[in-house]
Image (cartoon, grey):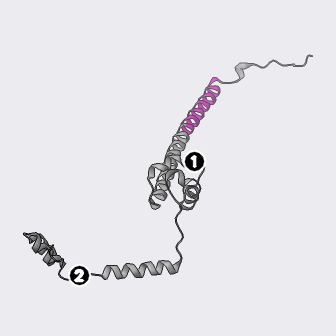
Amino acid sequence: MGRFDAEVDTDDYEDDEVDSGTQAMRQLRKADKAKAKRIAELEEQLNSLSASTRERSVKDALEGRGLNPKIAAFIPKDIDPTDEAVGKWLDEYGDVFGATPKAEVDPESMSALEDMDAVMQQASTPAGREQIEQRIADAKSPEELYAVLGIPPQ
């Protein structure tokens, strides 16, 4: 007796079982390819949306500082698209684009500036300004103009 006493008879397996096993494997492979394709499509969409969101966030941060949003093209991709991170980057490199760091204003100075602004908003032009302007415009001779302006004739 040899190592293998019996020969395997391939006729013992039914062709239907082999075909159905192969068919199932084909369907699994087909489903796997479809899933892989869908995953690739979704990853592409996610990357596109992430890039758009980052670009918009960076542009908003730049516009918030009164800068041209085109500067966003020069901000490295590894910088977070938050106002703080973009602001920090601009504080360091903004002078290249003509951007200067925002000056800190102490609360006392800000209060004084607000008070001056309130006074200026309530100020009015001197009474009779329009009348004086009209008299200047209506002057027909240098003497009349001198008289309106209060200058002695020459």
Q: Nearer the viewer, residue 32 or 139?
A: 139
Residue farthest to the front, as pictured: 154
At 52% from the left and 79% from the top, the residue drawn is 107
Q: Is residue 60 magenta?
A: no
Q: Which amino acid, mark 1?
A: Lys
Image position, residue 149 (x, y; %): 17, 76
Q: Earlier in the sequence, mark 2 or mark 1?
A: 1
Question: Residue 25 lies in magenta, yes or no?
Answer: yes
Residue at (51, 40) in percent of width and height: 41
Residue span colored magenta: 15-36
Q: Residue at x 57, y 58 (%)?
A: 91
Q: Secondary structure at mark 1?
A: loop
The residue identified by callout 2 is 126
Q: Position of residue 103 (x, y in %)?
A: 53, 67
Relative to 149, is 78 above or below? above
Task: Identify the disc placed on residue 37.
Answer: none
Secondary element type, mark 2: loop
Q: Is residue 134 visible?
A: no
Q: Is mark 2 in CB contact (under 8 Å) with mark 1?
A: no
Quarter location, residue 146: bottom left
Q: Is residue 97 above or below residue 29?
A: below
Q: Quadrant of residue 40?
A: top right
Percent position (x, y) of residue 118? Answer: 36, 81
Q: Decide: is 47 above or below 145.
A: above
Q: Quadrant where the N terminus lies?
A: top right
Position of the C terminus, as image quadrant, is: bottom left
Viewed as shown, does residue 6 lie left or right of 121?
Answer: right
Residue at which label 1 appears: 77
